[in-house]
């Protein structure tokens, strides 16, 4: 169910190669175009990594999504929730300067904490809503438009202002890192590797 939502959106927005055909991986993820402008390339890679995280969760039961890969306490469900928070933080809070609360409440600022009554459907719905809000906020923005880091985070990147370009690259890095975690967690759950 999760894969169908993310993968279908990625395919529907399809990226086309020079010959006009759209290339996808065997699992349905759109392959970022090899000869595109900067923005198309960055957005395509971000979508690819979003679809990869969804793929890591596809076909698992709720209890499996809650299993950590020791010694870490990280779970696939926690990663989906965390990325919902990351999407909100970087696109709404930092880029658009909106004063928005954490997605899953003040007691779960990073999104990793699990609640017994919140499963994959609710977490995915929140994640997809945050992705959609972010897309809306940057749709007409220039790559050089900037957002501002809160004062307490300014030392993190050496300054209070970051461009949309920087944010997109950071988001790709964030997803790529967590997709590596998801790879290890999924392998421990059922032996599935790759992608």
Image (tube, grey):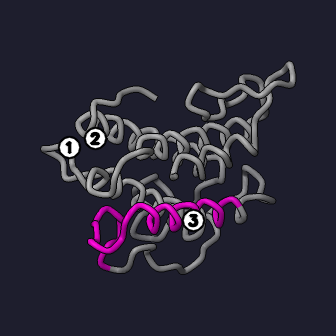
Against 104, is 190 above or below?
above
Label at residue 130: 3
Mark 1 or mark 3, earlier in chain:
1
Reply yes or no: does residue 126 show up in magenta: yes
Q: On the picture, is 75 further left or further right than 33?
A: left
Chain part drawn in magenta: 107-135
**Secondary structure of residue under mark 3:** helix
Dot placed on the residue nearer the N-terminal end, 2 or 1:
1
Residue depth check, mark 2 versus mark 3: number of the one nearer the observer: 2
Q: Nearer the viewer, residue 159 or 30?
A: 30
Q: Do labels 2 and 1 touch, CB within 8 Å? A: yes
What is the x, y in percent for residue 116? 26, 71
Residue that protrudes farthest toward the left in the picture = 71
Tell me residue 53's x, y (percent).
Answer: 46, 44
- Left or right placement of residue 164 versus residue 190 in this view: right
- Circle nearer the viewer, 1 or 3: 1
The circle on residue 185 is 2
Q: Position of residue 192 (x, y in %)?
A: 34, 30
Tag 1 secondary structure: loop
């Amino acid at each position: 169910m999760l894969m169908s939502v993310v993968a279908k959106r990625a395919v529907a927005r399809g990226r086309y190669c020079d010959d006009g055909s759209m290339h996808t991986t065997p699992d349905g993820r759109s392959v970022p175009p090899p000869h595109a402008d900067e923005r198309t390339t960055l957005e395509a890679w971000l979508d690819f990594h979003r679809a990869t995280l969804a793929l890591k969760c596809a076909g698992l039961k709720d209890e499996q999504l809650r299993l950590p890969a020791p010694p870490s306490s990280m779970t696939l469900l926690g990663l989906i929730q965390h990325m919902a928070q990351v999407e909100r933080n970087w696109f709404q809070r930092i880029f658009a300067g909106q004063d928005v609360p954490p997605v899953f409440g003040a007691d779960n600022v990073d999104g990793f904490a699990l609640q017994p009554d919140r499963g994959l459907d609710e977490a995915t719905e929140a994640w997809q809503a945050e992705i959609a809000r972010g897309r809306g906020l940057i749709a007409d923005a220039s790559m050089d438009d900037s957002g501002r880091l809160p004062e307490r985070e300014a030392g993190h990147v050496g300054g209070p202002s970051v461009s949309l370009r920087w944010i997109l690259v950071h988001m790709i890095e964030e997803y790529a890192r967590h997709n590596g975690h998801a790879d290890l967690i999924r392998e421990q759950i059922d032996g599935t590797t790759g992608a």
